[in-house]
Image (cartoon, rainbow, N blue to C red):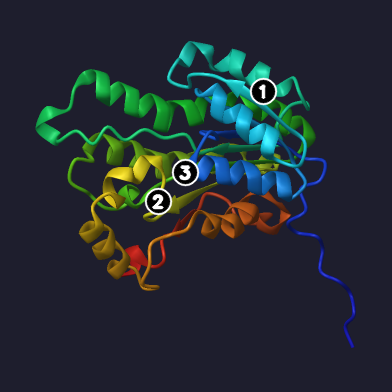
Amino acid sequence: MITAELPPFFDLKGKVACVTGASSGLGRQAASTLVRAGASVVAVARREDQLHEWSESTDGPTAYVVADLADRAALINIVAAVSEPFGSPDILVNAAGLNTREPADEITAEGWNATLDINLAAPFFLAQAMVPSMRAKGWGRVVNFASLQSHRAFPGGLSYGASKGGVAQMTRAMAEAWSSDGINTNALGPGFFHTELTAAVFNDPERSARNAAQTCIGRNGEVADMDGPLLFFCSDASAYVTGQVLMVDGGFTAK
């Protein structure tokens, strides 16, 4: 009889995590999930009131940094601030996102640049700045946030889709660059979850119902549906998994 216990794959005790976009939605859920798994978590976003409320209401080692990730020149300083409370991060979760929903004929240079700065540039340059300390430890996890629009075109989503298509390829390229140093990079591709970013979708009940019907499971996502996939990618459970985009969409992209 085999009686050996399984290793504690999802135990993050002793790990430090940085989660961007953590003031609300999937980013906030990710930050809370990692705290519950034992990690010390530094949340990053622009809204100090919501970051403060999250930190005060979360039972575990937490801190936060108020920052605008669109300011590329400030990213190095942001990484330094993130590293102050608990040390350099072992885990980076890039959950911050922007979707301007501009029709293709109305996309502005300002909207285009803002979308790519938040969705594509910030995840890369934050990871690049954190890689040296992860490499020194021989262990690291980078989790990017892809999208349904990494694979499909939606109305009003040209700039957002371009950025999220880039995230999918960037994830593979990050994995190629850093996995040999013990730094695995993967991406989660959420389906339709009711968050601030998707408020316009859920404010239209008919559209929300159509999206639910498009899934194999028959419903839209709840934020807790992201917990398991996130912990898988952030922990030793995914030791031999890198460069992958896992669609957490209830089978939306399977139909």
Distance, label 1 to label 2, CA atoms, is: 28 Å
Distance, label 3 to label 1, CA atoms, is: 20 Å
Instruction: Indicate the quadrant containing the C terminus: top left, top right, bottom left or bottom right.
Output: bottom left
Tell me the SS state at disc 3: strand
In the rendered view, tell whether residue 33 sits above or below residue 228: above
Name the residue tied to disc 2.
194
Which residue of the protein is positioned furthest toward the left in this rendering?
105
Taking the image as drawn, is residue 176 in sight? no
Name the residue tied to disc 1.
82
Tell me the SS state at disc 2: loop
Tell me the SS state at disc 1: helix
- Say which label, 2 or 3, has the lower sequence index: 3
Along the horizontal axis of the image, is 102 left or right of 179? left
| Contact between labelled residues 1 and 3, with CB atoms less than 8 Å apart | no
* Residue at position x 17%, y 46% in the image: 155
Query: Which amino acid type is shown beneath numbered disc 2?
Result: His
- Say which label, 3 or 1, has the lower sequence index: 1
Give the quadrant of residue 50: top right
Give the quadrant of residue 17: top right
| Contact between labelled residues 3 and 2, with CB atoms less than 8 Å apart | no
Image location (x, y in percent) of residue 228: 60, 59
Query: Which amino acid type is shown beneath numbered disc 3?
Result: Phe
* Residue at position x 31%, y 48% in the image: 149
- Say which label, 1 or 2, has the lower sequence index: 1
Report crowding for label 3: few under 14, some 14 to 19, many 20 or more residues within 10 A (C-alpha): many
Along the horizontal axis of the image, is 170 left or right of 131? left
| Contact between labelled residues 2 and 1, with CB atoms less than 8 Å apart | no
In the rendered view, tell whether residue 178 sits above or below residue 206: above
Image location (x, y in percent) of residue 116: 35, 28
Name the residue tied to disc 3.
145
